[in-house]
Image: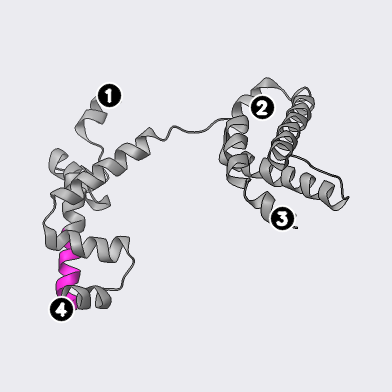
Amino acid sequence: MPNPKDSVLEHISGLRRYALRLSGNSVDADDLVQESLSRALMRQRKNAEIRNLRAYLFSVLHNTHVDRMAERRRWHENVTEAFLENSQFCPASQPDRLALYEVAKALDAMPEEQRHALLLVGYEGLSYKESAAILGVPVGTVMSRLSRARDTLRRLTNRAPAGQAKKRRRRKTGGKPSDPPEDSKARA
């Protein structure tokens, strides 16, 4: 006789796909699958006969989802709409994706030596010494390439280092770094 746990394991990927469609997000889907499998295994321990395991598991999953929805409905009746709107807020991911795309384009545009140093140290997390050994150059060369790579990346992504804004303001106004730019004086 096959082990019932093994036969249940065969259906987990299908259950997860179905749960993902029911719940709308992967965290809730994983919780739903776990809870439904727990219910199904409890019933198997009671030696209840299950003729079609796949259909039974999907039925348990569906019923678990219905139970959760009813519980949430009861919970939502006691909560204000303003709270629900704020609790379901999720910031848009487009700006982050655009920034990553911009960085990827900038990496492709920078000189190869700089890109290699930046990727080894900044992305892979290797030390200067390890990067130098991989690239076959002295540690100082890696440090120099990395510094130039960071400057190139800032320039290509239009992001100036923190100190650059003060220098530009000083050049524009001819004054001290604490002086506001001329445009803001006119507005005040």
Mark 2 element type: helix
Magenta region includes residue 46: no
Classify 4 as above or below 140. Answer: above
Bounds of the magenta span?
A: 136-148
Magenta region includes residue 145: yes
Sequence-wise, which precedes: disc 3 or disc 2? 3
In whole angstroms, how far apart are the C-alphas of marks 2 and 1? 39 Å
Q: Where is residue 108 in the image (x, y as percent from the top left)?
A: 17, 49
Q: In which image quadrant can residue 50 be found?
A: top right
Mark 3 element type: helix
Q: In which image quadrant can residue 69 be found?
A: top right
Its colouring scheme is one colour
The residue at the point 63 percent across, 40 percent down is 15
Q: Which mark is residue 187?
A: 1
Residue to which mark 4 is pinned:
138
> Does the residue at mark 4 contact the one at mark 3 (Cβ under 8 Å)?
no
Residue to which mark 3 is pinned:
5
Q: Where is residue 57 in the image (x, y as percent from the top left)?
A: 71, 40
Amino acid residing under circle 1: Arg
Q: Position of residue 32 (x, y in %)?
A: 68, 40
> Does the residue at mark 1 contact the one at mark 4 (Cβ under 8 Å)?
no
Classify 178 as above or below 58. Answer: below
Sequence-wise, which precedes: disc 4 or disc 3? 3
- Looking at the rendering, in which quadrant would you find the N terminus? bottom right
Residue to which mark 2 is pinned:
83
